[in-house]
Image: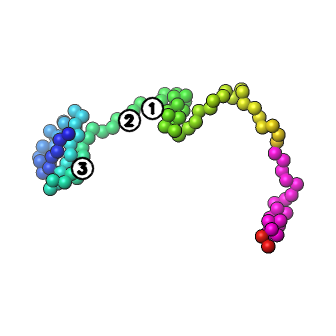
Amino acid sequence: MHSVGIKILKARLSEYVRLVKRGDTILVTERDQVVAELRPARRKSQGPSGLAEHLAALAERGEATLRTKSPRSWTPPRRKSRALPLSSTEILEALRQDRS
């Protein structure tokens, strides 16, 4: 890691850019205070090529959970839910009465 003042950096910019290209990090100072950092640009890593790799990468980062069973082993819900025999108006009226 190198440290350089702004005036010297301006005068020898191409030299310091070559150092950064090599992988070095340059701390830019002004009155002995670090004000900036020059480092090699991050190259975008090659992402996963397929869906399975993408899902595995998400699971590694904790952004998704992979299933543990195959879809063929899934079972449907045991009973279907039924709608209440009341209309929404009747339900609202019952709630209003409960509040009073």
Who's the residue at 22% across and 33% down the image? Answer: 22
**In the depicted structure, whether residue 86 falls above or below residue 55:** below
**57 in magenta:** no
* Residue lying furthest bottom: 100
The span shown in magenta is 81-98
Whether residue 89 can be seen here: no
In which quadrant of the rendered view does residue 14 lie? top left
Front-most of residues 6 and 79: 79
Q: Are marks 1 and 2 in contact (CB under 8 Å)?
A: yes
Q: How would you rate the neighbour count of disc 1 (Cα within 10 Å): few for under 14, some for 14-19, many for 20 or more?
A: few
By secondary structure, the bulk of the magenta-drawn segment is best described as: helix
Q: Name which of mark 1 and mark 3 comes first in the sequence.
A: 3
What residue would you read off at disc 3? 36
**Amino acid found under the numbered disc labelled 2:** Lys
- For label 3, the SS is strand
Quadrant of the snapshot with the C terminus = bottom right
- Name the amino acid type tagged 3: Ala
Taking the spot 21% from the left edge, 51% from the top edge, the residue there is 34
Which residue is under mark 2? 44
Q: Position of residue 95 (x, y in %)?
A: 79, 65
Question: Are there few (<14), some (14-19), or many (20+) residues within 10 Å of tag 3?
Answer: few
Which amino acid type is marked by label 1? Gly
Q: Verify CB contact (< 8 Å) between mark 3 and mark 2.
A: no
Label 2 SS: loop
- Give the label, 1 or 3, closer to the camera: 3
Of helix, strand and loop, which one carries label 1?
A: loop
Task: Point out which mark residue 47 bears.
Answer: 1
Which residue sits at x=26%, y=41%?
39
**Distance from Cα at disc 1 to Cα at disc 3:** 30 Å
Q: Left or right: 9 with respect to 77?
A: left
